[in-house]
Image (tube, grey):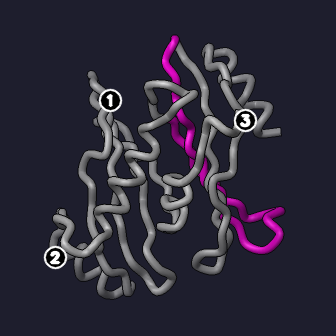
């Protein structure tokens, strides 16, 4: 039902799907299942990739949490940006990578209390020119369940849109061959 409502709202705005959702990765993580999907769409002649995460416990019939946002790509048939972004995220997790840590003392204290270990941040994975400028940022933490990556769409004057996935999802995104799906 919700999917039909979203599709009709998108169609009314002139957003045209170029593909169906493709599951990139689905895995158990932190007592729940995390599914990461992408699809391609077009709006005003610009191709976009839409990222979507769905998190659920058990059968997934209730208690689902979904997050999604779209980001422009040069060519939906060959989205080389996705592999480049995944490589950049994975490089930020390697020993010896330059570490960006904008947290203040309160943030560090909270992370210590929750058992999270700050790994790195990419302050600008991608940027859309403005106004307003929109940034795609990345935060990487390590918890008792492994490394997690938070993708953040940050636009001035609006709340951030974000989704968290296991690092293995980023590896799957890097290794996925999108042109073989269509």
Q: Which residues are magenta?
A: 45-70
Q: Give the foreground label among 2 and 3.
A: 3
- Which of the 4 quarters of the picture holds residue 4? top right
Label 2 to label 3: alpha-carbon separation? 44 Å
Membership of 59 in magenta stretch: yes
The disc, 1 or 2, on the residue closer to the chain's N-terminal end is 2
Dot 2: within a 10 Å radius of its alpha carbon, few (fewer than 14), some, or many (20 or more) residues? Answer: few
With respect to residue 99, does 123 lie above or below? Answer: above
**As drawn, is 174 to the left or to the right of 159?**
right
The disc, 3 or 1, on the residue closer to the chain's N-terminal end is 3
Membership of 38 in magenta stretch: no
Secondary structure mostly seen in magenta is strand
Q: Give the foreground label among 3 and 1.
A: 3
Residue 101, can we see it? Answer: no
Along the viewing direction, whichever of 60 and 147 lies nearer the viewer: 147
Looking at the picture, how far across and down is residue 2, in whole percent?
77, 39
Secondary structure state at the residue bearing disc 2: helix
Secondary structure state at the residue bearing disc 3: loop
Dot 1: within a 10 Å radius of its alpha carbon, few (fewer than 14), some, or many (20 or more) residues? Answer: few
- Return the mark for residue 96: none
Label 3 to label 1: alpha-carbon separation? 24 Å
Look at mark 1 in the image and give the residue it sits on.
Answer: 128
- Return the mark for residue 105: 2
- Return the mark for residue 20: 3
Q: Give the foreground label among 1 and 2.
A: 1
With respect to residue 40, does 15 lie above or below? Answer: above
Image label count: 3
With respect to residue 96, does 87 lie above or below? Answer: above
Along the viewing direction, whichever of 24 and 67 lies nearer the viewer: 24
**As drawn, is 16 to the left or to the right of 131?**
right
Looking at the picture, how far across and down is residue 13, in whole percent?
61, 16
Along the viewing direction, whichever of 132 and 75 lies nearer the viewer: 75
């Amino acid at each position: 039902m919700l999917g039909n409502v979203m599709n009709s709202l998108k169609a009314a705005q002139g957003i045209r799907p170029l593909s169906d959702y493709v599951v990139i990765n689905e895995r158990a993580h932190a007592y729940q299942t995390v599914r990461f999907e992408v699809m391609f769409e077009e709006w005003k002649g610009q191709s976009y990739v839409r990222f979507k995460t769905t998190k659920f416990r058990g059968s997934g019939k209730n208690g689902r949490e979904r997050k999604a946002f779209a980001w422009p790509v040069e060519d939906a048939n060959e989205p080389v940006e996705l592999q480049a972004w995944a490589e950049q995220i994975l490089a930020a997790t390697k020993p010896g990578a330059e570490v960006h840590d904008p947290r203040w003392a309160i943030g560090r204290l909270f992370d210590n209390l929750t058992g999270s270990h700050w790994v790195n941040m990419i302050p600008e994975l991608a940027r859309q020119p403005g106004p307003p400028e929109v940034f795609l940022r990345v935060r990487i933490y390590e918890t008792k369940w492994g490394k997690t990556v938070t993708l953040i769409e940050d636009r001035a004057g609006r709340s951030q849109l974000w989704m968290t996935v296991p690092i293995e999802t980023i590896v799957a995104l890097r290794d996925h061959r999108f042109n073989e799906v269509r």
